[in-house]
Image (spheres, helix red, strand yellow):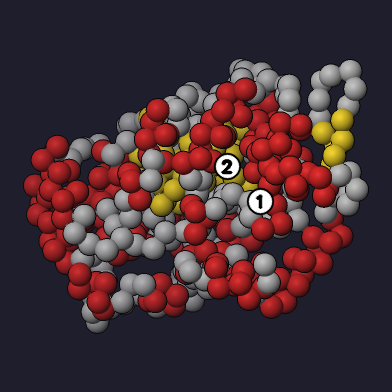
Amino acid sequence: MCSGHVTAHLQSTPNTALLLRPLATGRGLRRSIARFRTSRPSKQIVKAKAHSADSQSLSRRQALLLGAGSLAASNFATPDTVQAETEAVTASGIQSAETVQLGQSGLQISPVGVGAWSWGDRTGYWGYGNEYQKDDNLEAYKAVVGNGISFIDTSEVYGFGLSEEFLQDFMKQTGTQPVIATKFAPLPWRFREQNVVEACKKSLKRLGISKLGLYMIHWPGFITNGWCNDAFVQGLADCQQQGLTQAVGVSNFNLGRVKTAQQILKDRGTSLASNQVQYSLLYRAPEKNGVKQACEEGGTSLIAYSPLAQGLLTGKFTESNLPKGPRGATINKERVAEVQPLLGLMRDIGSAHGGKTPGQVAINWTICKGAVPIPGAKSARQAKEAAGAIGWRLSNDEMAALDNESSKLPSALGAPFENW
């Protein structure tokens, strides 16, 4: 696939385009290709792991022809099982009035987490450096832990590592430690399960901790490493086996990939704790594409990112107050106008619960759907609002009314990862 086609495909979702922009355009793509050429595996041999008397090997060309399924079968015929870790990851210095278990992992977290994508973001998407600074993120962190939220989600690509580094600073300054989730990015030059382990260790160093609560694959590999996704899942199990994380999960995985990951991890003696996907009143695809059901049936928690539809469900945007930057492409006057009936219903429901805001109603809706929402919080005010969604529940009638009203609206854009 040529670079123009890659760019066009990634730009179908603004979030994705900005997150991967260094890999998809101009100089960034050339650098990625150069790095791929110098660090990819041997052109001749892909070594296959087996516990039989004679080891087998496949040439790279043969492996590609056989496909990911055959390669996975050759590589992981009889893998080592994950040994149970006796030391559980728990939040320190944070009092949570309510906790839930993530999948079957035994990991206990608050029913609402916070996403740290915007902390130190250097893509320009969230306005870091102009609209807010590191001190604002610190105040957000203090409000997060001070209001009983014990689960924070980040990634090695958020701020190109800066989000993880901020978290280390914030934990040291406050003497607290939430349960931290971070993610492995299947960049074009990564092919092996060992890449997952290496990336996990680097994230731990940036975070300044010895063990994660949850480690995930950020999105499925594609183009250069689309055939490596099973290996990446094996890498998650390796991280768990080495005591680097208590639980393992995936993100942006479709129905087929979820089931495959569940089976691979089951064969390794562990489980898929979570699948992190976009899920909100304005994006209900997981209910329709089988992902939510597969998670429920397999004992996998659904973690919901963008539960506020990037701020649209808070009601803060109006025709005269629209978001700046790339978000303005999708949150425009027309979109703001068409969601007003839903926001009106959310305000009425919030009033019946002691003055809850539309944003708190939106977050609580995802909780009632059985998901763990992780709204972003750039400031203390946003963090406190997220915490206000904990400790109460919408009624069945209110859920039905919200489902009905939201079903009348066009869906928000989904990440193209979900279809790969």
Mark 2 vs 1, N-terminal side: 2
Q: Which residue is mark 2?
A: 216
Disc 2 residue type (three-letter) = Met
Q: Nearer the viewer, residue 220 or 223?
A: 223
Image quarter of residue 146: top left
| Residue at screen point 66% across, 51% down | 226
The percent coordinates of residue 393 (x first, y second) are 20, 38
- Image disc number at residue 226: 1
Task: Please say whether residue 334 is visible from this viewpoint.
Answer: yes
* SS assignment at label 2: strand
Instruction: Identify the image quadrant of the N terminus.
Output: bottom right
Can you say whether 357 is above or below 200 in the image?
below
Drawn side of residue 31 relative to residue 54, left or right: left
Image quarter of residue 358: bottom left
The percent coordinates of residue 321 (x first, y second) are 27, 78
The percent coordinates of residue 184 (x first, y second) are 63, 47
| Residue at screen point 20% across, 70% down | 338
